[in-house]
Amino acid sequence: MSANQDGANLLEVRGLTKTFGTLTACDHIDLNVAKGEIHALLGENGAGKSTLVKMLFGTLEPNSGEIFWNGQAVTITNPGFAKKLGIGMVFQHFSLFEALTAAENIALSLDDGSPISTIAAKARALSYSYGLPLDPQSLVGDLSVGERQRIEIIRCLLQTPQLIILDEPTSVLTPQEADKLFETLERLRSEGKSILYISHRLEEVKRICDRATVLRHGKVVGHCNPRKETASSLARMMVGNDVPTVVRAPAEGIETAQPLLEIRALSRKPATPFSIPLRNINLTVRAGEVIGIAGVAGNGQGEFFESVSGEVPQQDAASVRIRGKDAGGLSITGRRLMGAAFVPEERLGHGAAPRMKLSENLLLSRHATDGKVFVGAGGMVKSDAIYAAAQRIIKAMDVRKSAPDPEAAALSGGNLQKFIVGRELDRRPSVMVVNQPTWGVDAGAAAHIRQTLIELARCGSAVLVISQDLDELFEISDAIAVMHNGELSKPLPIAEATFEKIGLLMGGAEPGHAEHALETS
Amino acid sequence: MMRLELVKRPQRSMLFSALSPFIAFALTIVAGAILFALLGVNPLKAFQIYFIEPVSQVWQLHELAIKAAPLILIGVGLSVCYRANIWNIGAEGQFILGGIVGSSIPVLFPQFEGPLVLPLMLLFGMIGGAAYAAIPALLKARFNTNEILTSLMLVYVAQLFLDWLVRGPWRDPKGFNFPQTIQFNDSAILPELMPASGRANWGFVFALVAAVLVWILMSRMLKGFEVRVLGSSPRAGRFAGFGINRMVFFAFMLSGALAGLAGISEVSGAIGQLQPVISPGYGFTAIIVAFLGRLNPLGIVAAGLVLALTYLGGEAVQSALGISDKVARVFQGMLLFFVLGCDTLIHYRIRLIGFAAPKLESAPKLEEAR
């Protein structure tokens, strides 16, 4: 066993490599995390960040490379061993049981047999001391996403880790909640704990991180001090070239344009005990405009999308109107035939069938609207036609792939998203509803997708974008509405909207107040 | 404590996916050899009698076709269900109802003769099977009942209903109280293909035609695409606008119709009247056929012939060696076991976990989340 000379490093990674088939997700990664620092792991989605931390946490086995912990070479074979070493992890996607209380969830992962009341008391004390107040007796299903994240963090802290890995922690928080998290992280740093902070949000990395390691296509492209860099220089390191900026020409005469998508008093009862009811939602999207819907995840956006798309039709036919006609009672196919197109949040398993080829996935949303082109007599699929159309979309959207017509699951998230958005744009829809258009898409592709959405609107379509990414909404929207707990605020014109105003609405400031303030101003 | 854990493979091997039925068959042979040896029979001789002799003469090939026809017809229908992730286990009952409803014409109207009789019987058989399959479909669509249980339980209902019919209202009045219906008249008998060389009837042709048609449906048509999407990713299917309840009815009724056709073909072809028992478990064996054929209609034709051979071989070892013909069931069971085992190992590998190793908190995800 070779010992590391530099004692100040808590964690040192040398030449860590992981391959999946022909794809090298991590290619000879070197990384040092010192004691008492917040170290950023920067990179676009698909750069290998998650693969790297899964190897550090023992859920993936590296093909080669070495990991040193306090100077000792270690082989982390499973998460239990990682925890024993003192590595804690807060995942991007929470692993909590909704039907159990916070304390019960914590007890499950501690696995040391101490009674729940003791755990609850410890968790409560710890949560207050770190400024993350948490009621251990509350049911997870009743908690907001931000509160659920607190459970994950407290659960992690209870194991007194030396190194805490946080995977995109702010993606589910309002700007105000994020500020609070940053205070906690700074507090932890002052106690000598190390934090590996994974993010692609440059501003927050600049704000709280001491050092940064930048990954691109599975390789380390540089180490830097983020405070000495600018956001654009960091972005350049991450992306490899300058990120194209999105151009948004001002929309003119929108007030008088024809409304293409109207939502009138849309309400929906919760379908399951843990889903959000929709409460009297009203919204008009006119030809030529992009309306953004902001909100913390889990505030009814998914239910809203299902209702607007017609995956779940409404009782009241007039609650959704497309191009001036009632569509509330129609199925998703009926609404598509009226000229609407939809892009859901989940790519694999919702927007695309993972084990089917791209050409077949083209048929998924277009078998009815392009029935004559893609389906011949007697219901026979014209495989040449769908193949040609898929290739056309692949070319138009610059979808990168390993085979001429691969399975959807073989594509990276960003490339699959480009294909799914392209599949709908190719139809020139007059109403386009997109849920999280650039979730996990690399910066270049995200800019491309955003630009095409703006252009679609400027050509006379109505575009509705639901997103958790405020930067994105400010970039493309003509007005932003906020969804909170199943209610939708009145859209704020982009000229009047600020991060602070939107953030307050996201945190649950009464939508009515904003509406009122708007009318009096 | 040592324990085994299945870990998902990053990729499945195309080679082994294709080889899997053959490996399963080879493993069955090995296990069968051990079985015969334990019974005190020379395995080589037993295999000679079990697998070679039943197909060494032309008339025996006809017998093979007679046994294979219902297996293929039912298996092809079941493959559509299973591809749609709908678990119809009740083909045996749908087979029996097809036989009953189709036979109603020659039994209730024995004077009705002519070229129309047979097509009508076949049509009635399909309707009977489809209607019977519609029951579990309705229960699933309306009340979300588990179709595995309902379709299976309806098998016993069908068996007892047939038993009651042939002992009660449909019993041949001149049949010396034997529990059977009258012999069908000539125009109600499914003709033999080549009467000169053996007994095989048109049922085998129906099976081949059904296999080709379903293959076209599944691989070339929008409806087949719908089946595959709803089976593999139901949420994506809903996004596509495909109705899951409609699919439940479609898959159940298609497989029910094919099982019903198999039932009436068997009754009017191989038997010529209704009896208390008209199937040696074809509806259940066809489940094995469907999986051994990798849910591909063309593969099912081959698998149907293999399973038909296990029936013939079972009869042969009984008469030649005095071993119970239940050995056929054992072979069928082993074959299904090994097929499913091979399929599992194509998708997963086994990992041995030594003692003191703590549990994995979450299964490793192979790709980055989303």
Image (spheres, rainbow, N blue to C red):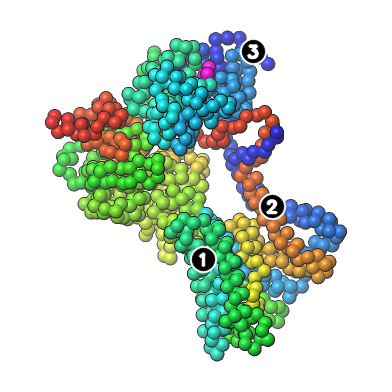
Answer left or right for B208 relative to A441.
Answer: right
Q: Residue furthest left?
A: A520
Q: Residue at x 69, y 57 (%)?
A: B333
Residue B206 appears in the figure: no
User: How far apart in space, not on screen, are marks 1 and 3 (Cα)?
Assistant: 70 Å
Task: Give the residue pinned by disc 1.
Answer: B133
Disc ID at residue B338: 2
Task: Give the percent coordinates (x, y) of residue A450.
Answer: 33, 36
Residue B346 locus on image (x, y percent): 63, 46
Q: Amino acid at mark 3?
A: Ala
Q: Residue A211's spot in the image, x, y percent?
A: 45, 15
User: Numbered disc 2: what chain?
Assistant: B
Image point 25% across, 49% down: which residue?
Answer: A319
Q: Residues within 10 Å of mark 2 (few under 14, many from 20)?
A: many
Q: Which residues are magenta?
A: A160-167
Q: Is residue A137 left or right of residue B42?
A: left
Residue at (61, 13) in percent of width and height: A71
